[in-house]
Image (cartoon, rainbow, N blue to C red):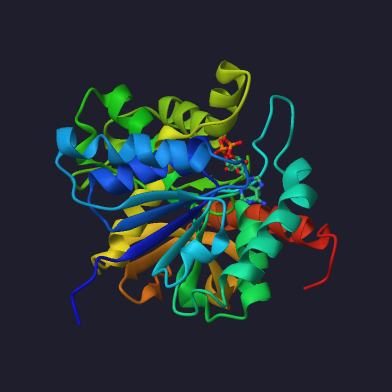
Amino acid sequence: MAIQRPKISILGAGATGATTAHWCAAKELGDIVLFDIVEGMPQGKALDLLEAGPVEGFDVEVRGTNDLADTRGSDLVIITAGQPRKPGMSRADLLSANYRIIRDLVERCLPLSPEAYFLVLTNPVDVLTYVVKKVTGLPRNRVLGQAGVLDSTRYRTFLARALGVSVRDVHALVLGGHGDQMVPLVSYANVNGIPVSALLSREEIERIVERTRKGGGEIVELLKTGSAFYAPGAALAEMADAILKDRKRVLAATTYLEGEYGFSDLCLGVPVVLGGGGIERVIELSLDEADRDALRVSADEVRAQIAELPERL
Ligand code: APR
């Protein structure tokens, strides 16, 4: 048998889906199928991206489709289909509409790709990752959500700019749900091992934490129509890279918890080891009281949204 490249299917070829395809192709992570319900649009975007190959030097297949059957045999299914958040619209408002879209898509997708990992982006991501976990019945290592990589990269951006240092040297984690109650950890944020608290004032750090929490909303307000897509796409590609190249990266991922951090039967952003086995391990950090309390508030927010789902799972 000829050796084959990994197959990545991206459901939803909108702003984030197409940008994810772009980053994944540029990194040569695998052959890409871009699926959407809008006729011609995924085909057009896929062909356009494919035609960048000779300039950028990537040798991967990029194909657009309106037929879910073309996703057959995927190693990784990335879910970005759904309604975008509009100004003034809360993540919770999106719940009902996106629940039906995601449920329908994964129910049809799983039989086509029974071995796939499922990576969810569509908001509210904590709840929809939970929906995918429940609807598919897959073990938790194969279903994860993207939020923490994006929130952490925003946090790292703001810290690096405040410090006037390279983004490469700033390491930081954001835990919890992908809402205003997310938990940017201060005690673990560092510049090549130097705690940020040794380099920035408490007030500056607090301002950065607040800006991180509202990072998605800041972009929505500026764009007026639609929400962020460059950094979300880059975050998805980083997670895809970790899985498909078995890198065993330590990243924050929206994960179905089974007692870790004192929570079960909900999905929340926690640090994990991400590799060829998907979520290979959840890392349980010791948290100070303020962070523990903040994580509880965030978990309560996610639980409240799960309770609002139109159907019990
Ligand atoms: N099947 C496939 N694609 C669908 C379906 C469906 N049932 N329903 C909607 N879509 C597609 C839309 O046609 C659109 O192309 O999903 C795409 C969503 O793209 P955008 O509207 O550009 O939204 P985007 O900015 O990419 O955000 C996608 O991520 O941040 C979250 O909340 C945001 O849910 C949104 C998602």
Q: Is residue 156 above or below residue 8?
A: above
Where residue 145 sits in the image (x, y, percent)?
52, 58
State left or right for residue 144 relative to residue 32.
right
Ligand 1 image-quadrant field = top right
Quadrant in the rendering for residue 6: bottom left
Note whether residue 269 is visible: yes
| Between 57 and 162, the one nearer to me in the picture | 57
Residue 204 position by quadrant: top left
Image quarter (top left, top right, bottom left or bottom right) of the C terminus: bottom right
All told, the count of numbered labels is 0
Closer to us: 304 or 49: 49
Who's the residue at 24% across and 43% down the image? 26
Percent x, y of residue 11: 53, 53
Residue 156 as seen in the image, left or right of residue 227: left
Q: Quadrant of residue 68?
A: bottom right
**Residue 1 placed where, x, y %?**
20, 82
Residue at 53% of width from left, 37% of height from top?
41
> Which residue is nearer to you in this view: 251 or 23?
23
In this rendered view, identify the residue nearer to me: 11 or 297: 11
Residue 188 in view in this figure: no
- Residue depicted at 81% across the width and 60% down the height: 309
**Residue 222: x and y, percent?**
56, 17
Tell me which residue sits at (74%, 32%) in the image. 89
